[in-house]
Image: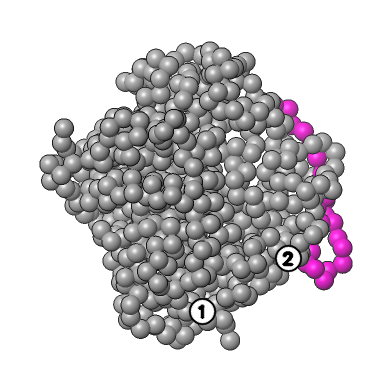
Amino acid sequence: MSDRLSTNLKIRRGRPDDPEQYEVFPFEYEAGQSVLDALRWIRSNRDASLAVRYSCINANACKECVMRIDGRTGYACTTPLRPGEMLIEPLPNKRLIRDLVTDTLPPDERLSEV
Amino acid sequence: MAQYLQTDVLIVGAGGAGMYAAIAAAETGANVLLLDKSIVGRSGATIMAQMTVAAAVGEEEPDDWRFHLRDTIAAGRDLVDEPLARILCQTAPERIWEMEEWGVGWARSGNHLTQAHAPGHDRKRCVYVDFLNTGPATSRTLRNQVRKYDNIRRVSDLIVTDLVTQDDRVAGAVALHLESGQALSIAAKATVIATGGLTGMYNRNSASANMGGDGFALGLRAGAELIDMEFVQFFPIGHLAPRLIGMDPIMWDPFRYKLGGRLLNGNLEEFTQNYGTPEDGKYVVTRDTATYAIFKEVEAGRGSPHGGAWLSFEHIAEADLRAAFGPVIDRLAKNGIDLTKMAIEVAPIAHYHMGGLRTDDSLACNVPGLFATGEAVGGANGANRLSGNAITEAFVFGELAGRSAAAFSGQAMPDIREAAKPLLAMIEATANRPGDGMTPTAAIAKLQGIMQRNVGPFRTRAGLQRALEDLSELAVALPHMPTGSAPTFNQQLADWFGLRNMVLVAKTIATAALARTESRGAHQREDYPGLDEDWANNQIIRLEGDEIELSRGEVRRLAKEEFVHE
C-alpha cells in the first residue's frame, strides 16, 4: 500500500450575505487522490453541511465540480491533492449560492424561469 | 403557498432515457417538464458511458435484430422478459440512425460504422464514439435536441420526494427545490420515472452520485410493482489501483475489446481457464464468470495487492496502444500509468441493475399514469445484461416511454392541491430537524458498506439476514437524523431523502435475494450453488403498508420461431 500523505483544505464557507469565512479541514490521503475525494470524505465524516456540486465522481464527464482551487479554475475530480495547504473556493464570476456551489445552471433551467 | 406547476408529461430524471422520452413526448405536441435532482443532461449514468451501444445495424457484417435478441435472451439466464427484449433489439437500429442524423458521430471506418465484438454477442454489433466518448457525445446530442422544443421545460436542482396518487392513479409529484429549500407540487397527466439504477448503494461502484434507486422507492410508495430486484450486475474489471482520476472506472472494457489484454491473479498467472473460459489474449469471458473467477482467486489468497486481479497490456506495442486510444494514453500518463511498463489492478464493481419497475409493452406500470424508462425498467435483461444493451435501452425505452406517456395525457389536468398537502408537510417537517446521531450523509456511506459486504455478487442466508437487520437499524434511525440548518442548497437534507429511498430499495434487494435459493446470472448464493430449474420465475415486489410483499411471476416469453431463424 502507498504511504499516507496529509494536507489541509482551507475552504470558503457561507452564503452571499455572510461575512467572508474560511474553514480548514485536515485530510490524510494516498498519492493520486483528488480534491473531490477529500471534499466527499469531509461531507461523510466531518461536516455534512458542506455544499459542493458533483455527479459523475470519477469520469470528468459531468463537469459539475468546477471551482477555484489555489486561485485557478479547475475540476475538483481531476485536481490531485498535494501536501501542505490547498485553498478551495467557489467560482468568483458566478452568483454564489452556498459554500462551493455557484449558479452554473443554464439560465433557462432554473425553477424561477418556469 | 407552495409553488404549483402543471404539465402534460412529467419526466423525473434527465439522463439519456429521460431526455429521449422528453423529445418523443414533445414531438406529439404534449407539454413536458423534464426534471433532474442535479443538472439536466449532465448527471446520471449515460454521460459516463465510455463504452459501446449494441444494435443490429449490420454495418461491419450482416446482422439481424433476431440474432441480437437471441444473444440478449441467452445472456439473461432464462429470465428475460422476451417481449420487452424484442422491442429493445428490433427498434435499436432505428434509434442508432436517428442519433446519427442528430449528429452524434458514431465511429466510422471508410464508408460504414465501426462495430466492436463485445463478449456475449455472436458478431460485431456494438457502435461507439471515439475516443471513449460514447456517453459525452450521446448526452450532448440529446441536450441539443431537447433545447429545440419550446414545449419542453427543463428544471435542474429539483428533487422529487414522492409521487402524488389520487383516484387510483399517479397524478404528479411533490419536490424539494435544492437551491431555495422550497417544497412544491407538480400536477401531471402522465409521469415517467427515468431515474436510472441503484448501483450507488454499493461502495465499489461505477455510478454517478444520484444512482441511489430513487425511482424504485417513488414507484413502490405509489403502489407500483418491482421485478427482479435481486439482480445487480457487477462489472468484473472495474479500476481498483493505482488511484486514477478523471476517468470512468469501467474504462478497461473498451481496452479489452480492442486490444485483448491479459487478466492475471496475484501470482501473475492466467486463471479464467480454471473457471471454464480460457482467454488466449481475447476478451471472451462473460461478466458473471469473470466476477466469480476474480472473487474466488481473492478468496483463495491469490488476489492482487488491493484485493482484485491484475490486468496487463504490457505485451502490446505503444504504437498499437496509441492507434487504439490516442489521447487517453496521455491522460493515463498524467496519472502515472504507463501500460507498456505496468499492469493495473481491477476488481468487480457494481455497474448496472437488471431489475426495476414492472411494466407492460408500452412501459406503463401497474398504476395508471405512471411509466418507466431506461435502466429503471425491469425485466428486459433478465438475470444478466449483455454488454452494450444499456445505452440501447436508454434510447429505445426513452423514445417509447415518452410516446406512451404523451398518448396517455389526452385527459383533464388533475388537481392535486389537496392530495399533495400531507406530502408537502412531510418535506417541511423533515427540513431543519436538529436531530441527533449520525448524519444521513454518513449513513449513506454505512449503507454502501452493508450492501457491498452482504448483498454483493456473492450471497449467503446469514449475510443477507444480517444485512436486513443492519438496514432495519438505519430505518429506525432515519426519522431522527439531523437534516442541516440552512434551507439554501441543503445537501444534508437532500441526502436524507436519498437515504430514505435507499433503505427501502436495499431491503427489496436483500429480501428478494434471500428468497431466491439458487444461483443464476448476477445473483450467486454461496449456500445454493447452481441454477435451479424451478426458479425460472421472476420475483415481484410490492409494498403493503410498510411491509415488502414478495410473490412469483411467470416470465413473459415469445414463441421460439419469433427470434430464431437462420
B434 to the left or right of B455: right
What residue is drawn where x is 54% and y is 40%? B133
Label 2: how many Cα within 10 Å (few below 14, some 14–19, many 20+): some
| Residue behind mark 1 | B5
Query: Is residue A109 or residue A34 the one in the foreground?
Result: A109
Distance (Cα) linking label 1 and label 2: 24 Å
In the image, what residue type sits under mark 1? Leu
- Answer with the quarter of the image where residue B496 lies: bottom right
Chain of the residue under the numbered disc 2 shown in the image: A
The residue under label 2 is A97
The magenta stretch spans which residues? A1-24
- In the rendered image, the vertical position of residue B85 relative to residue B147, given as above or below: above
Coordinates of residue B512 in the picture (x, y in percent): 33, 50
Q: Residue at x 45, y 86 (%)?
A: B418
Frontmost of labels 1 and 2 is: 1
Q: Nearer the viewer, residue A76 or A44?
A: A76
